[in-house]
Amino acid sequence: MSYAPAGGPAAPADEAARRRVVGTPPARAEAVPCVGQIAGLRPHADVELLDALDHHTRRTVAAWLQDRPSTATRQACLQTLAGFVRWLQSAEPGLGLLAATGAHLDAYCEQARIGALTVGVRNPGRALSGATVARKHRALSSFYWFAWSIGAIRQGDGVCTPADEPRSFAITREERRMLRHGASRLAADGRVAEAVAVALIEATGASVATLASLTSEDLHAVGHGSNNPLVLVTMRDDRGDVVTFPVPTWVHPWLRALSSTRAAGDLLIKQGDGQPVSIDWLTAALQDAGSAGGVPASRAKLLHPRRLRAGTAAAPA
């Protein structure tokens, strides 16, 4: 197994100074409680507006923006959400963002379509195209779905809360054991990339974007002379800092198999078509691993990358 030595030439010069204690979970919403601290979001009126929200809402907004896959997407989502907040504050003063309903979202989008918005838009009174309104609706729906998935809103309170599903999903210790067993079943069936992805997200709580960017150079073997060297994986957390996690011993053979087929700098985990990991692909892998490991079907279908991270993202500071 040709892992790069920890702290070797491939590592950033300042990595040692920034690297955290091995096994420390990556920072999420509680470590970046303010929108203005998120990479790529410069302080301006929209950032200040969202950072002025109550503590619980601000943390939820920050977690959602951090979960966006790129800086450009974060900026677009920031602008959309800030516009909706301004409209909501004007239409129903005192109503919190997390207390808005589907009727509020529909009313906002309809006013945008007919040109009736006077706040929260660049050109008040100007009708927006159907495509623009649809993008706004998708972004806002995504926010409320995320807020529901991490338990930030209760069933029936948010725009996108499914009526037939529980308010939140907390995976149990036994279900985590089943999920790890299911990952082994996937590997035995030749689905090694999926097995590695499931194992890493379960062990580290990494985001989909982080898993999608991993290369073989992010794996580091410590103690090359021993039969079972400690293998570390280095990742970038939500703030861009380097964090390091030990990889469970039972995952090592899968990493060897993947690394042997990857050129230096190539993505470590890929979909079957060679494309980078997507949230849909990883969700399907989690649910398949859950089912294979014995998680009841009603629970396995609720497995989702964001829900495995939800406990930390929603925890009070």
Image (tube, rainbow, N blue to C red):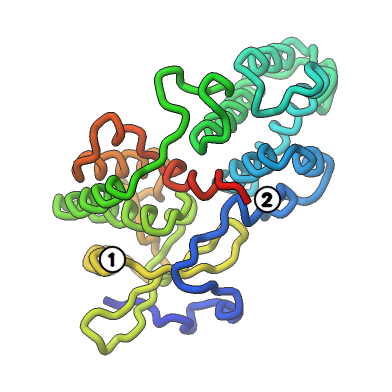
The residue singled out by tag 1 in the image is 255
Q: Earlier in the sequence, mark 1 or mark 2?
A: 2
Name, please, the residue furthest toward the left: 188
Residue 257 showing in the rendered view: no
Label 1 CA crowd tier, 10 Å (few <14, some 14–19, many 20+): many
Left of 195 or right of it: where is 311? right
Left of 76 or right of it: where is 241? left
Label 2 CA crowd tier, 10 Å (few <14, some 14–19, many 20+): many
Residue occupying image coordinates x 40% and y 82%: 5
Question: Which is in the foreground here, disc 1 or disc 2?
Answer: 2
Residue occupying image coordinates x 65% and y 44%: 59
Q: Is residue 206 above or below residue 80?
A: below
Q: Residue 175 versus residue 128: which sits nearer the camera?
A: 175
Q: Residue 310 versus residue 142: which sits nearer the camera?
A: 310
Report the amino acid beneath label 1. Leu
The residue singled out by tag 2 in the image is 33
Residue occupying image coordinates x 67% and y 16%: 104
Q: Which label is found at residue 302?
A: none
Residue occupying image coordinates x 36% and y 61%: 268
Q: Quadrant of residue 250?
A: bottom left
Residue 200 percent coordinates (x, y) = 36, 58
**Secondary structure under the numbered disc 1 in the rendered image:** helix
